[in-house]
Image (cartoon, rainbow, N blue to C red):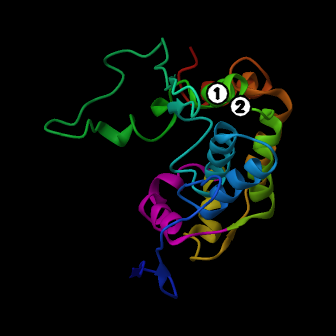
């Protein structure tokens, strides 16, 4: 079966996947490659999943982030045991019911100024990184440091912007432009990148190195937490 994605210079092809040992499926080839590298290095499915998540946070940050939230569902292939890990986000304790002004008649929980979806008042305490680290510690084989390495490489060397990423940047350009550090990366020269243009994320690479060196707790009680709290306090966010 063949198909064509708007913006790509050539056709893309879909075919069934055949493998003798394992398959890593993700949104992006680089994320799948990160998972495969981990499996080849002695990791298991949980290790591969976390490596792919870190890689996706580089190449498709609109979908996955250590600063985000989600869930883990793990099934042991031998025993059949199923484990569910809740690493969703928590609303700050300082949040109040009247913090946002709803737009009358909105069916999508829209608020005035989009304050509940963009900006510092839209941020909750993330559970993703702690959940990833817990899954690896309890069910993985390799250290977290090893699993972050592919993502660090992609962020440092850069990656080619896919049509999906470019279209998402175009759709969110107005919101991205509000934050200079984000705009510097994703709106080079004040405009969305071209498909295939290389995006380098040096700042995020430094964050990933800090996570690799200090573990997940850096985001909750460590140096990274202090940086996040200071930024939130300086911009009207909730810090407790």
* Residue in the image at 48% along x and 66% along y: 164
* Residue in the image at 54% along x and 31% along y: 74
**Is residue 233 a member of the stretch shown in magenta?**
no
| Residue at the bottom extreme, as displayed | 10
* Residue in the image at 22% along x and 37% along y: 103
Residue 83, image x and y in percent? 52, 23
Residue that mark 2 sits on? 140
Task: Tell me whether circle 1 and circle 2 mark residues in contact (CB < 8 Å).
Answer: yes
Position of the N terminus by quadrant: bottom left
Residue that mark 1 sits on? 135
Q: Residues within 10 Å of mark 2 (few under 14, many from 20)?
A: some
Which mark is nearer the camera, 1 or 2? 2
Position of the C terminus by quadrant: top right
Q: Is residue 213 left or right of residue 170?
A: right
Mark before the other along the chain sequence, 1 or 2: 1
Residue 2, image x and y in percent? 41, 82
Q: Which mark is residue 146?
A: none
**Is residue 164 a member of the stretch shown in magenta?**
yes
Residue 142, image x and y in percent? 79, 35
- Asked whether residue 21 appears in the rendered view, the answer is yes
| Magenta stretch: helix, strand or loop mostly | helix
What segment is highlighted magenta in the picture?
160-180
């Amino acid at each position: 079966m063949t198909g064509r994605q708007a913006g790509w210079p050539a056709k893309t092809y879909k075919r069934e996947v055949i493998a003798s040992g394992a398959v890593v499926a993700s949104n992006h080839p680089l994320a799948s490659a990160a998972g495969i590298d981990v499996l080849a290095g002695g990791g298991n499915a949980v290790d591969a999943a976390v490596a792919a998540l870190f890689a996706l946070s580089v190449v498709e940050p609109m979908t996955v982030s250590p600063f985000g939230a989600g869930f883990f569902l793990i099934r042991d292939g031998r025993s059949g045991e199923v484990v569910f890990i809740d690493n969703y986000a928590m609303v700050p304790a300082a949040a109040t019911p009247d913090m946002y002004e709803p737009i009358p008649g909105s069916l999508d929980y829209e608020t005035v100024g989009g304050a509940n979806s963009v900006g510092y008042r839209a941020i909750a305490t993330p559970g993703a990184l702690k959940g990833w680290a817990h899954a690896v510690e309890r069910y993985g084989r390799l250290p977290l440091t090893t699993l972050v390495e592919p993502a660090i490489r992609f962020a440092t060397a850069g990656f080619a912007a896919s049509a999906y990423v470019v279209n998402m940047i175009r759709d969110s350009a107005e919101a991205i432009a509000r934050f200079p550090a984000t705009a510097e990366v994703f709106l080079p020269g004040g405009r969305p990148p071209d498909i295939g243009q290389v995006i380098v994320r040096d700042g995020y690479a430094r964050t990933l190195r800090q996570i690799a060196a200090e573990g997940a707790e850096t985001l909750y009680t460590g140096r990274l937490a202090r940086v996040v709290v200071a930024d939130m306090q300086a911009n009207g966010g909730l810090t407790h």
